[in-house]
Amino acid sequence: MNDTLSVLLIEDDIDECYDIQNCFANAENIELVGITNNACQALEMVQSLLPNIILLDLELHSGGGNGLLFLQKLRKLSLPFTPYILITTNNVSPITLASARQLGADFILTKYEAGYSAQYVLEFVELMKTAILSHESATNRMNATITQTLPKLNLTQRIQRELNLIGISPKAVGFQYLIEAIRLTAEKPETNLSHTLAITFGKSSASIERAMQNAINRAWQTNNPEELLKYYTARIRSDRGVPTMMEFIYYYATKLSA
């Protein structure tokens, strides 16, 4: 079991971020892997960093979104384990705090209570460290067993996660086509992939190919180029600077079957 606890901080108070960063810097086997004040960016960071614990401020007035919205969307992500959610907040509303718990918060530290500080947060994290890592180790062992019995489901979830990282929306017409195309290619390359997909979805080969390429094109047109380069590392041969449908499918099929 890895004995280092990774922590993601979602906080819009600059002084609070500074204090926690300094305090955690000296902690043994606890690593602060990221800081953000934006709920949407936080979701992307969770997917890429897979932190063991998330320190979440509910009110992100100086950033974007809010903690409840983050918790709601976090539940929809396909993650190998559920991070431990530690709320830190000035909010005094019992209804709001109850909602946070219903949405998955594990514990709530109120910033207005006596003795609250970055050191207090660190001491709580240290107290929970062994239990969190042990729980996630058990979850990973269970997931490994599930993977052996349900490999198709696991691969599909991994493909969904990769498409989410580069901004291909589940609402895109080509989203499900791409998932099935990558899954088929990863498991057993098809000689006539478009024909197989046409039979599966009851659509023409041309319409399926067009939908997949449109989904890819939209991702490259609307998303941050640096983020795309971070998650899609293959060379793009097209003069348009966008992967072709088959380049895209083979890249992820190779990546996820490795």
Image (cartoon, rainbow, N blue to C red):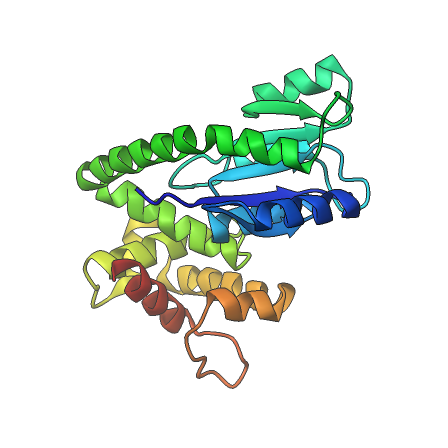
Q: Residue furthest bottom?
A: 239
* Nearest to the observer: residue 183 or residue 128: 128
Q: In this view, does 217 lie to the left or right of 80?
A: right
Residue located at (21% from left, 64% from top): 189
The image shows residue 5 at horizontal and vertical percentages of: 45, 42
Q: In this view, does 227 lie to the left or right of 249?
A: right
Q: In which quarter of the image is the N terminus?
A: top left
The image shows residue 10 at horizontal and vertical percentages of: 65, 42
Residue located at (20% from left, 68% from top): 191
The image shows residue 11 at horizontal and vertical percentages of: 70, 42
Against 38, residue 54 (above or below) is above
Residue located at (54% from left, 25% from top): 104
Q: Residue furthest right?
A: 62
* Nearest to the observer: residue 180 or residue 157: 157
Quarter occupied by residue 66: top right
Against 145, residue 191 (above or below) is below
Against 168, residue 122 (above or below) is above
* Nearest to the observer: residue 82 or residue 190: 82
Q: Is residue 212 left or right of residue 68?
A: left
Quarter occupied by residue 182: bottom left
Against 171, residue 242 (above or below) is below
Residue located at (72% from left, 25% from top): 115
For the image shown, how many numbered marks are present on the structure? Answer: 0
Q: Is residue 253 left or right of residue 57?
A: left
Residue 41 visible, this angle: no
Q: Quadrant of the C terminus?
A: bottom left
Residue 96 visible, this angle: yes
The image shows residue 192 at horizontal and vertical percentages of: 24, 66
